[in-house]
Amino acid sequence: QKVAAGLSGIPKNLEEQAISLIGTDIYTKLIKGYTEKQWGRKATELPSFIIRRLPVRYTFDNNYFNHRYQGVPVDGYTAIFDKMLDSDLIDVQVNTDFFSNKEDYLAEFPKIVYTGMIDQYFNYEFGELEYRSVRFESETFETDNKQGNAVINYTDAET
């Protein structure tokens, strides 16, 4: 399919890399729309290395990772973080303007986990980074199992 798609040599972008790995048909049906929706850019404008993070398997193994043991915490990830942060030595502040008191925080706390924009943290020393945002819509259904899976990725560009 590489030759049919007009590809030769080293892939120059994500689209060429994907087609070289899985062919035009699967790329068009499963990767193109989802990727362009995720990144907000055409696949031809994205670097080829991005697509190599996804494993290509020729088996019925639908696990994301190849690790022997995989799982999700019984009480979820929130409970794990709640337990890790439940200490008198840890001060959790959310919805806080870090930069309004940056010098005070840095002087008062020996360690800080900052989860804001990293380019802003460094005063845009290397320029501004581009950020993507997502919008989540939650619905509750009165049924035991609506979709059959915990996560479903809608690969078309419209969904």
Image (cartoon, grey):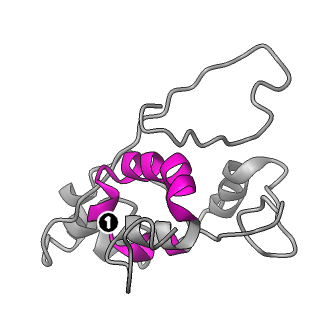
The range drawn in magenta is 23-52
Answer with left or right where residue 90 lies relative to residue 39. right
Q: Which residue is mark 1?
A: 46
Answer with left or right where residue 22 lies relative to residue 39. right
Amino acid type at mark 1: Leu
| Total numbered badges shown on the rendered structure | 1
Q: Nearer the viewer, residue 149 or 76?
A: 149
Residue at left offset 75%, top offset 49%: 76
Residue at left offset 61%, top offset 20%: 139
Q: Residue furthest bottom?
A: 9
Taking the magenta stretch, the answer to whether it contains residue 51 is yes
Taking the magenta stretch, the answer to whether it contains residue 17 is no
Answer with left or right where residue 95 lies relative to residue 146. left
Q: Residue furthest front?
A: 4
Residue 66: name its quadrant.
bottom right
Image coordinates for residue 8, horizontal then vertical, percent: 38, 81
Image coordinates for residue 41, horizontal then vertical, percent: 28, 53
Structural crowding at the residue carrying mark 1, measured as other residues with C-alpha within 10 Å and reported as few (<14), some (14–19) or many (≥20): some
Answer with left or right where residue 20 lies relative to residue 83. left
Res. 19 in view: yes
> Tag 1, which secondary structure?
loop
Q: Nearer the viewer, residue 60 or 128?
A: 60
Q: Nearer the viewer, residue 130 or 60?
A: 60
